[in-house]
């Protein structure tokens, strides 16, 4: 079907008038300058094992939900839904689940989390098409596939491009934003900072082309994010490094970050990431729990 000229003219008119909306922010300037939620985006996330990809993206999604009431569908083949919900409760409340005195308060927080997050049963493997149907049925704003290699599919070069094209088309046709967690190839996992570097001997962050499946994932995505952590480092192991490697549309917000200066998100003992001491959920956290009175403060609405 040929694109209608009036739609093109309408876009140009809006762009000329400054009406093209920016993507949604979370209230952390360092992150908002680099990454935005945008409807219908296909985002690839790359990171080594055990660096906290799932935890960080769930925190980021929760920040968007609290601020903009976005809904998410989550398929995580490597994590139980209960574990993920407990993390989200701790991000949202600013307290460990075990430290919340009354289980009824935990349940109230669970219901708030489940207002925004729907979890896909991970007891079976899904094809991409099956997940896309489930995502669409939830009427979500965005969805997480975690990880790519957990899908029931072939992983040949041709099959990978079929998946990328299908995902791109799904995003275009539904307006649902997809976030895809991926791992790097083995060669990337062997790369370490050289002798003399302050992080000598620790693994280096992978680059776009080292994504499992190759450069095609960077070619076909909207934005490309690398998440990294110096696992085992005595002082840096709880700093999650965020590298924005690609932003397809800078007109609607976002920019590639300096390769030498990633955005550092401190893990904060699992109670929500902070960037230069700023966690947008803190304004929510302080209103959630009154541990002296042993209950959730009443009439909390996000």
Image (cartoon, rainbow, N blue to C red):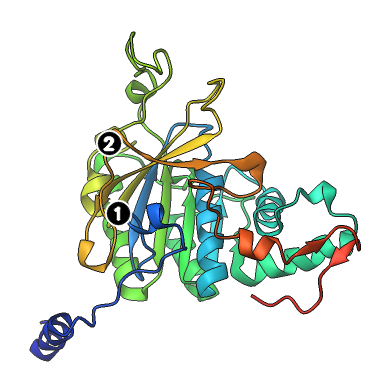
Report the quarter where the C terminus lies.
bottom right
Q: Say which label, 1 or 2, has the lower sequence index.
A: 1
Residue at left offset 40%, top offset 53%: 31
Work out whether residue 131 or residue 299 is closer to the camera in this orientation and state it. Answer: 299
Residue at left offset 79%, top offset 68%: 108
The quadrant in which residue 88 appears is bottom right
Q: Label 2 crowding class (10 Å Cα cut-off): few <14, some 14-19, many 20+?
A: few
In x, y percent, where is residue 268? 62, 42
Vertical position of residue 254 compared to residue 298: above or below: above
Taking 256 as reference, is 182 left or right? right
- Which element is circle 1 on? strand
Report the quarter where the N terminus lies.
bottom left
| Residue at numbered disc 2 | 259
Vertical position of residue 128 compared to residue 226: above or below: below
| Residue at numbered disc 1 | 223
- Which element is circle 2 on? loop
Q: CA distance from mark 1 to mark 2?
A: 15 Å
Tag nearer the camera, 1 or 2: 2
């Amino acid at each position: 079907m040929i694109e209608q000229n009036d739609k093109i003219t309408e876009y140009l008119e809006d762009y000329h008038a400054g009406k093209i909306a920016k993507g949604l922010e979370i209230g952390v300037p360092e992150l908002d300058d680099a990454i935005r939620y945008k409807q219908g985006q296909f985002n690839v996330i790359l990171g080594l094992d055990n660096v906290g990809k799932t935890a960080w993206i769930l925190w980021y999604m929760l920040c968007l939900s609290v601020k903009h009431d976005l809904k998410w569908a989550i398929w995580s083949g490597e994590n139980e839904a209960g574990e993920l919900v407990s993390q989200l409760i701790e991000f949202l409340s600013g307290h460990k689940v075990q430290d919340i005195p009354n289980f009824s308060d935990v349940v109230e927080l669970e219901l708030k989390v489940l207002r925004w997050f729907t979890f896909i049963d991970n007891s079976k493997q899904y094809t991409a098409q099956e997940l896309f149907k489930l995502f669409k049925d939830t009427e979500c704003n965005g969805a997480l596939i975690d990880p790519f290699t957990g899908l029931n599919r072939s992983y040949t070069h041709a099959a990978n491009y079929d998946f990328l094209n299908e995902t791109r088309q799904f995003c275009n046709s539904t307006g649902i934003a997809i976030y895809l967690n991926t791992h790097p190839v083995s060669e990337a996992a062997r790369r370490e900072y050289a002798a003399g570097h302050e992080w000598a001997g620790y693994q280096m962050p992978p680059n776009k082309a080292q994504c499992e499946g190759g450069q095609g994932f960077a070619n076909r995505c909207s934005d490309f994010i690398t998440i990294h952590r110096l696992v085992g480092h005595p002082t840096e192991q709880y700093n999650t490094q965020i590298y924005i490697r690609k932003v397809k549309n800078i007109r609607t917000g976002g920019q590639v970050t300096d390769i030498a200066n990633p955005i550092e998100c401190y893990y904060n003992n699992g109670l929500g990431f902070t960037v230069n001491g700023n966690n947008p959920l803190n304004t929510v956290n302080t209103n959630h729990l009154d541990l002296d009175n042993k209950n959730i403060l009443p009439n909390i609405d996000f």
